[in-house]
Image: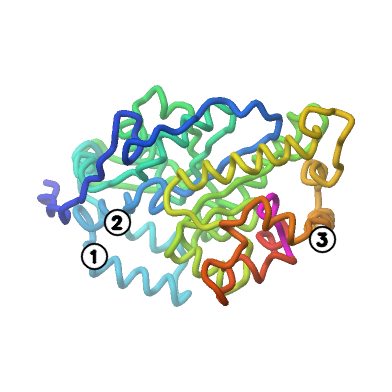
Amino acid sequence: MAPIAISPPPIVVKSINESGRSGVEQVDTSSLGTKRKIICFSDFDGTIFLQDTGHTLFDNFGCGPERRAVLAAELESGERSFREVSNDLYASLDVPFEDGFEVMKTALDIDPDFKVFHEFCINNNIPFNVISAGLKPILRRVLNHFLGEEASKHIEIVANDADISADGSEWKAVWKHDSDLGHDKALSITEYREEAKMQSENGTIPMIVFIGDGVSDLPAAREADVLFARRGLRLEEYCIENKLAHIPFDTFADIQKEVTKIARYDEEKTHGLGSPNNFNPRADIWRKASSKAAASIFAALSPREEKMFIWPETFMPRTPGLKSPAAPAIKEASAIAPVAAVRA
């Protein structure tokens, strides 16, 4: 018999209107009418959802938080790999899938602005992909519940599969890659990029946006052109400490605002505010960049003043005498395409 679920701590439910957004402000999610090709990859736990689906299961139906902390320490010290630790965690579970999901429904909070951002992506033909070290059946079921199946079907999930017995007594991860990581997120993004390049009419590379919250997202983040890091969490701290170009965000509304700037700026620079003859080759270098060397050239051609004008919230000092977290990396990469710094 599966153990009785431990009641999760009370969840503070945010006030969300019918569109899924906090507050009452209405956000325009209509098509931008731009031609810039953008592909979004996002972490799941701690990014789209503010809690961790795996931790919810392990703490309620598995080894518990104390044992999980021991395993986390072994992983951090390098004593054991992510795949080894995860196998132990999944092996500790003893709960039917549906029973576990019932707890997740009440334990998880979705980012209050994610639904609107996802609508924005759909309306602008921006593919949105979840890239996770978790289990695909869990992630899909959670998205179906919080977004609805119609909206959820527009999200591709790049994650590990799972083999779960009917009675829930046996959970096994079916790893996507034969490696210590189990799922090599960087490899998945690279494969996606190459496939998109082959499908392109002119062989150009789409701009990859990655959204994350933790250091475990770094392998994927280094393959992205633009990196969004949830403010105040470990990924942002790491970027600041190591001078990696990034854009901090509090909710997905911030991401929508910045992506809109990027797309509109590129359209204006490329087409000269409606004049196809006024073409700025620099604005199109990212499409042709197929190597780190080419990306570095693009970074060198992007002056600091231009970036500060387009993204003042990101690159201007927040308070007198205090440099923005991104300021040390300005000479290495721009917010339009911080390829060189992010991939370093």
**Residue 226: horizontal and vertical position, in percent?**
63, 51
Q: Quadrant of the C terminus?
A: bottom right
Q: How many numbered marks appear?
A: 3
Nearer the N terminus, badge 2 or badge 1?
A: 2
Marks 2 and 1, how far apart at CA = 8 Å
Is 6 situated left or right of 215 in this image?
A: left
**Residue 157: horizontal and vertical position, in percent?**
48, 38
Is 101 situated left or right of 160 in this image?
A: left
Quick one: which residue is furthest to the right in this view?
277
- SS for dot 2: helix
Q: Which segment did they paint magenta? A: 332-338
- SS for dot 1: helix
Marks 3 and 1, how far apart at CA = 48 Å
Which of the numbered marks, if any, corresponds to residue 65?
1
Name the residue at 59% across, 39% down.
Answer: 260
Q: Which amino acid type is marked by label 3?
A: Ala
Q: Give neighbour class at mark 3: few <14, some 14-19, many 20+ (Cα, 10 Å).
A: some
Q: Give neighbour class at mark 2: few <14, some 14-19, many 20+ (Cα, 10 Å).
A: some
Q: Which amino acid type is marked by label 1?
A: Pro
Which of the numbered marks, if any, corresponds to residue 55?
2
- Mark 2 and 3 residues: CB-CB less than 8 Å, in contact? no
- SS for dot 3: helix
Task: Write down the residue under mark 3.
Answer: 300
* Closer to viewer: mark 2 or mark 3: 3
Magenta-colored segment: predominant secondary structure:
loop
Nearer the N terminus, badge 3 or badge 1?
A: 1
